[in-house]
Amino acid sequence: MLNVAVLVSGGGTNLQALIDAQERGEIIGGKICRVISSKPGAYALERAAKANIPTSVVDRKRYGSSYDFDDAILFALQNANADLIVLAGFMYILGEKVTKKYEYKIINVHPALIPSFSGKGFYGLRVHQAALDYGVKLTGATVHFVNEHADAGPIILQKSVDIKNGDTPEILQKRVMQQAEWVILPKAVSLFCQDKIEIKDNKAYIKE
């Protein structure tokens, strides 16, 4: 049984999707062992507490540099004996010190079909606003491995979502979460925990 640590910064809707999937028995071979928040008052901590999942806080504001913050995150992950790290609304880009230590062991969900509307500066409602501004007819979500570059690691799973006339960024965000993010993130975690993801030439393949 692999230990899954979830890094959060806010409300924890994707964390809740993972908790719900775990309670339904959909995450095979792994269990959420720790929720680590970059903010002391994040509602995600309450979600974890309700599910009896241990929590830790690594307050970004307490660290003067990103290097010191990365050291603190590393310490928390090692303390949790993490085998897999899931970024679920975690608002900071982890440095190479962390990504190299846990190479191909950190996954993130991004609310677009990478490589569209991804990279530095594309997060939250900005992603959905960009999709609407461009006029694309399909958007979606991507689960990918994390490296030192924003949204640039190997893609594990993607799921498309229709854009509809009259959509606002808020409406689209909700649809993408419900129809894509909350579906493929738990699935990717389960695939990892079952050792069903293989990396070749920096690309992720799902084993049949």
Image (spheres, rainbow, N blue to C red):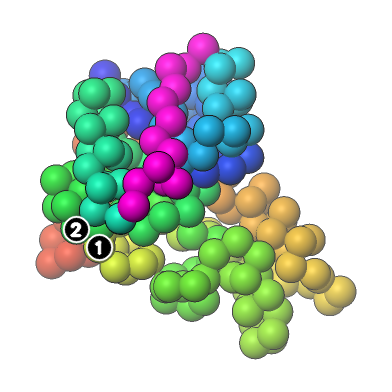
- Image coordinates of residue 63 in percent, x first then y, are 35, 46
29 relative position to 36: left or right: left
Residue of label 2: 96
Residue at 21% across / 48% down in the picture? Answer: 98
Which image quarter is the N terminus in? top left
Residue 101: in magenta span: no
Residue of label 1: 148
Residue at 62% across / 71% down in the picture? Answer: 126
In this rendering, the answer to whether 110 lies above or below 138 is: above
Which stretch did the figure color magenta? Answer: 52-64
For label 1, count other residues whose C-alpha is less than 10 Å away and answer few (under 14), some (14-19) or many (20+): some
- Quadrant of residue 4 in the image? top left
Residue at 49% across / 72% down in the picture? Answer: 121
Distance Cα–Cα, label 2 vs label 1: 5 Å
Dot 2 amino acid type:
Glu
| Residue 144, visible in the rendered structure | no
Look at the numbered disc 2 and give the secondary structure of its residue: helix
Dot 1 amino acid type:
Glu
In this rendering, the answer to whether 19 lies above or below 136 is: above
Closest to the observer, 191 or 96? 96
Among numbered discs 2 and 1, the one appearing first in the sequence: 2
- Image coordinates of residue 176 in percent, x first then y, are 65, 57
Which image quarter is the C terminus in? top left
- Quadrant of residue 155 in the image? bottom left
In this rendering, the answer to whether 203 lies above or below 20 is: below
Residue at 31% across / 46% down in the picture? Answer: 69
The dot on residue 84 is: none
Q: Are marks 2 and 1 in contact (CB under 8 Å)?
A: yes
- Image coordinates of residue 55 in percent, x first then y, are 44, 22
In this rendering, the answer to whether 81 lies above or below 178 is: above
